[in-house]
Amino acid sequence: MKMLDDRSGEIFRRIVESYLGTGEPLGSRSLSRLLPMSLSPASIRNVMSDLEELGLIYSPHVSAGRLPTQQGLRFFVDAFMQIGALSEDERRQIDRQISPDNRDTPVENALNGASQLLSSASRGAGLVITAKNDSQVKHVEFIRLSPEKALAVLVGDRDEVENRIISLPAGITSSQLVAAANFLNAHMSGLTLTEAGERIARLKETIRTELDQLSRDLVERGLATWSGAADEDGPTRLIVRGRANLLEGVDGAEDLDRLRMLFDDLEKKESLSDILNLAETGQGVRIYIGSENRLFSLSGSSLVVAPYRNSEDRIIGAVGVIGPTRLNYSKIVPMVDYTAQLMSKLAGKG
């Protein structure tokens, strides 16, 4: 701020706010009509030249208006941006979408709701990263789909549901399906999948006594399917809503290439832990603009992200928005912050 006097600061602020609102360069003549003080276009151009030398703005074309540089955006966010407060209506809308106080709301619904909410409120994509939930088993069921296939249904203690199609042992009957499910419910209920696998492995003699060969085979297939799916998903997973928002305003092959890079980055599993690491680097909401974020530097995207925690104050996920550098930061920051607070409440409910 010490680099800019009141006049330079006002011109710089108007250029950035115009860019955030329209994405278009702002010229000296348009600026002269916007400024609260009386300045000629020539005087404004002189100030613009000084701002360019400071690396805060640039001209995308000869004789065009000015746009903020990445350095200028960072300076604006740190020195000029005023974070707005959420209105009561906005808070109620987020509350309804995520419902942390509704104990009957499945966690999966809240995760999807948070992602959709942040997407709708921004020009970007809403994202939620969550640690793979090794929840306790509440109920197990096998539903026959055909003579050779069944749907293996696993319900967790917070009503999240895992469905997997599995191959049935040849000749298995409906009563054997029920027997296998009853055995698993009797010995898995209240345990995580990892704990359940270890218990079943210790119960080989009990399995031989209580179940016939086909039912034993089905028990092993069900455990292997659920455990394998958990391993494939990895320790974290990403929910993204609103990718179509990122297509708005995309013009030309270069923009499309950057967007493809962003989508590719979002599909990489290592990206998930990288985003979590970014969220963990400080308290509250973090803003990463363009190349400040190594993960999305090639696509030139901005990331607004905040962690959420469980009842033990351990970070178990993150919520945020990713999109073009002209995101409405002042609106998105309080929304990401409040959403992260609600997700922490949800993660901590018993």
Image (cartoon, helix red, strand yellow):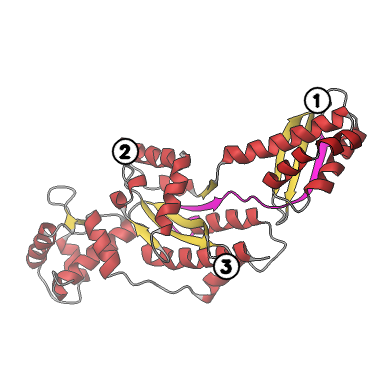
Counting labels gives: 3
Pinpoint residue 274: horizontal percent, then vertical percent.
42, 48
Give the residue type that dot 2 points to.
Gly
Q: Quadrant of residue 263?
A: top left
- Spatial CA distance of label 3 from label 2 is 37 Å
Q: Residues within 10 Å of mark 3 (few under 14, many from 20)?
A: few
Q: Is residue 186 above or below residue 145?
A: below
Q: Is residue 138 magenta?
A: yes
Q: Is residue 193 magenta?
A: no
Q: Earlier in the sequence, mark 1 or mark 2?
A: 1
The answer to whether residue 236 is seen in the rendering is yes
* 3 or 2: mark nearer the eye: 3
Q: Residue at x 16, y 68 (%)?
A: 32
Q: Mark 2: which secondary structure?
A: loop
As drawn, the label of residue 93 is 3
Q: Earlier in the sequence, mark 1 or mark 3?
A: 3
Pinpoint residue 199: horizontal percent, then vertical percent.
75, 44
Dot 2 corresponds to which residue?
Answer: 252
Q: Badges 3 and 2: C-beta atoms under 8 Å apart? A: no
Q: Mark 3: which secondary structure?
A: helix
As drawn, the label of residue 148 is 1
Pinpoint residue 211: horizontal percent, then vertical percent.
89, 34
The outermost residue toward the right is 175
The answer to whether residue 145 is seen in the rendering is no
Q: Residue at x 43, y 57 (%)?
A: 279
- Spatial CA distance of label 1 from label 2 is 51 Å
* 1 or 2: mark nearer the eye: 1
Residue 111 vs residue 217, the one in the foreground: 217
Q: Mark 1: which secondary structure?
A: loop
Q: Earlier in the sequence, mark 3 or mark 2?
A: 3
Q: Residues within 10 Å of mark 2 (few under 14, many from 20)?
A: few
Part of the protein shown in magenta: 119-144
